[in-house]
Image: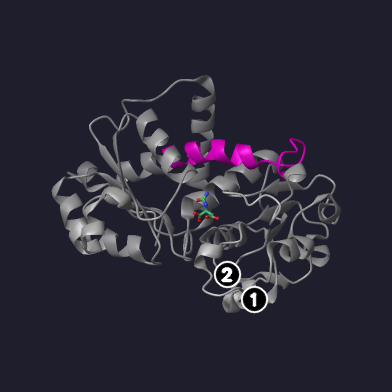
C-alpha cells in the first residue's frame, strides 16, 4: 500500500521517498513542539477517534496530544467502556463510528489485520496503532526518526533488534522500514522467539548477544510479551536476563557509540538493566517518546490532506 494511500496500515510496501516524506515532516514538528507552539488551525473541525482494543500508555497519549496540538477534536474510546463488551462486532463498531463522520481513526487491536478490515468499512483515514503481531507503523517511523537525528542517516547502519521478535509488531515494522532504507538488520534472540519467516525478510539471525551485537550502531531491545505466550517459550525471567538481557557487559560487544532503544513498556531486569535504560549517554528511550508525538502529528497532517473531505 503506497504512502499516498488515505490510510497508514503498515510499513511493508512503502518506498524510501514515501517513508522520507513522513520523517521530513515529523522533523519540522519536533521543532514546533520544542518551541512550545501549536498549529491548531491545521485539523480544526476534524474529529480523531482513538479506538484502543488493547492497553496502551504512550501510543494512545501521543496520538491524543498530536491531534490536539493540530487542533482536532479528539475522542478516546477504550474497550473497557465501549459496546464491544456488550458483544458488538468490529464491523458494527465501524458502522457506528462511520455514522458519526469521524475523519481520522486510530486503531489498536489484538487481531492482526483488524485495522485493515476497518479501513475497508469506514470513510475515515485509518491509522494502525498496533495490530496483533503484525505491524505498528508509527513506532517504526518514530524509531527511524530517532536514529536519523542521532546518527545522521539510516543507510549502512547496523541495527540489532533483540529479544521477543516472534510476538513483536514493532520488530516487524522496523524490519520493513530499516531494510527499505538500507540498514543492516540483525535479529537476536532465543530460537523460540525468532519467527520462522525471518530468513525471508532480508535480515540475519543470531542466537548469541555477543555475535548479534558485535559492531552494532543501534541496539533495539524488545519487551518479553508474556501476554501473547500460551505456554512458556522462555523458562524464567532470571535465566532470560542472563542470556539476552542488556547489561553493560553485553552492550560492550556493540560499537562504543552504540545507542540503546526500547519501544516501552520496559520490563526492567528482564530484557534490560536499569543501569543501561537510564544512562543518558547510551539510552535514547525518552527521546523515542518525544519523537512519537512529532511522527504522529506528521501522520495526521499528511493523511488528513489525502482524506475524502479534501477531495470534495
Ligand atoms: C509496543 C506495542 O504495543 O506493540 N509498545 C508501544 O507501542 N510503545 C511494544 C510492547 O507492547 O512491548
Residue at 34 percent across and 25 percent down: it is: 40
Give the x, y percent position of residue 234.
Answer: 66, 71
The numbered dot on residue 32 is none
Colour scheme shown: one colour
Residue at 63 percent across and 49 percent down: it is: 262
Give the x, y percent position of residue 229.
Answer: 54, 70
The numbered dot on residue 166 is 2
Residue at 49 percent across and 32 percent down: it is: 29
Quadrant placement of the N terminus: bottom left
132 relative to 53, above or below: below
Q: CA separation, marks 2 and 1?
A: 8 Å
120 relative to 299, above or below: below
> Which residue carries the number 1 mark?
192
Query: Residue at the top extreme?
Result: 36
Are dots 2 and 1 in contact, CB under 8 Å?
yes
Which numbered disc flags the more N-terminal residue, 2 or 1? Answer: 2
Residue 93: quarter of image: bottom left
**70 vs 79, nearest the viewer:** 79
Instruction: Identify the magenta region.
Output: 277-297
Most prominent secondary structure in the magenta stretch?
helix
Classify mark 2: residues with Cα within 10 Å, few (<14), some (14-19) or many (20+): many
Count the marks. 2
Decide whether residue 282 is among the magenta residues. Answer: yes
Query: Residue at the bottom extreme?
Result: 196
Decide whether residue 143 is among the magenta residues. Answer: no
| For residue 143, side relative to residue 134 (left or right) | right
| For residue 159, side relative to residue 225 (left or right) | right
Give the x, y percent position of residue 143.
Answer: 59, 48
Give the x, y percent position of residue 130.
Answer: 44, 56
Amino acid at each position: 500500500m503506497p504512502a499516498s494511500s488515505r490510510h497508514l496500515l503498515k510499513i511493508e510496501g512503502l518506498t524510501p521517498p514515501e517513508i522520507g516524506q513522513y520523517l521530513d515532516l515529523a522533523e519540522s514538528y519536533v521543532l514546533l513542539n520544542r518551541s512550545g507552539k501549536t498549529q491548531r488551525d491545521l485539523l480544526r473541525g476534524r474529529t480523531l477517534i482513538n479506538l484502543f482494543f488493547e492497553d496502551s500508555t504512550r501510543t494512545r497519549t501521543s496520538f491524543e496530544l498530536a491531534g490536539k496540538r493540530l487542533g482536532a477534536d479528539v475522542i478516546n474510546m477504550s474497550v473497557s467502556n465501549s459496546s464491544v463488551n456488550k458483544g458488538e462486532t468490529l464491523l458494527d463498531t465501524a458502522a457506528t463510528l462511520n455514522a458519526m463522520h469521524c475523519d481520522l481513526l486510530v486503531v489498536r487491536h489484538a487481531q492482526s489485520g483488524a485495522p485493515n478490515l476497518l479501513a475497508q468499512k469506514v470513510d475515515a483515514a485509518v491509522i494502525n496503532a498496533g495490530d496483533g503481531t503484525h505491524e505498528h507503523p508509527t513506532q517504526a517511523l518514530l524509531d527511524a526518526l530517532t536514529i536519523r537525528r542521532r546518527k545522521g542517516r539510516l543507510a549502512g547502519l547496523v541495527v540489532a533488534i533483540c529479544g521477543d521478535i516472534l510476538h513483536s509488531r514493532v520488530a516487524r515494522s522496523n524490519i520493513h522500514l530499516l531494510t527499505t532504507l538500507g540498514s543492516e538488520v540483525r535479529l537476536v534472540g532465543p530460537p523460540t522467539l525468532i519467527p520462522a519467516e525471518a530468513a525471508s525478510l532480508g535480515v540475519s539471525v543470531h542466537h548469541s548477544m555477543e555475535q548479534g551485537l558485535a559492531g552494532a550502531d543501534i541496539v533495539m531491545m524488545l519487551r518479553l510479551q508474556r501476554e501473547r505466550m500460551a505456554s512458556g517459550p522462555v523458562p524464567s525471567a532470571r535465566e532470560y536476563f542472563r542470556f539476552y538481557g542488556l547489561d553493560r557487559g553485553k552492550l560492550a560487544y556493540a560499537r562504543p557509540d552504540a545507542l540503546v532503544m526500547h519501544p516501552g513498556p520496559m520490563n526492567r531486569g528482564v530484557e534490560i538493566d536499569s543501569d543501561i535504560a537510564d544512562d543518558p549517554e547510551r539510552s535514547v528511550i525518552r527521546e523515542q517518546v518525544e519523537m512519537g508525538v512529532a511522527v504522529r502529528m506528521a501522520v495526521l497532517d499528511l493523511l488528513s490532506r489525502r482524506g475524502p473531505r479534501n477531495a470534495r
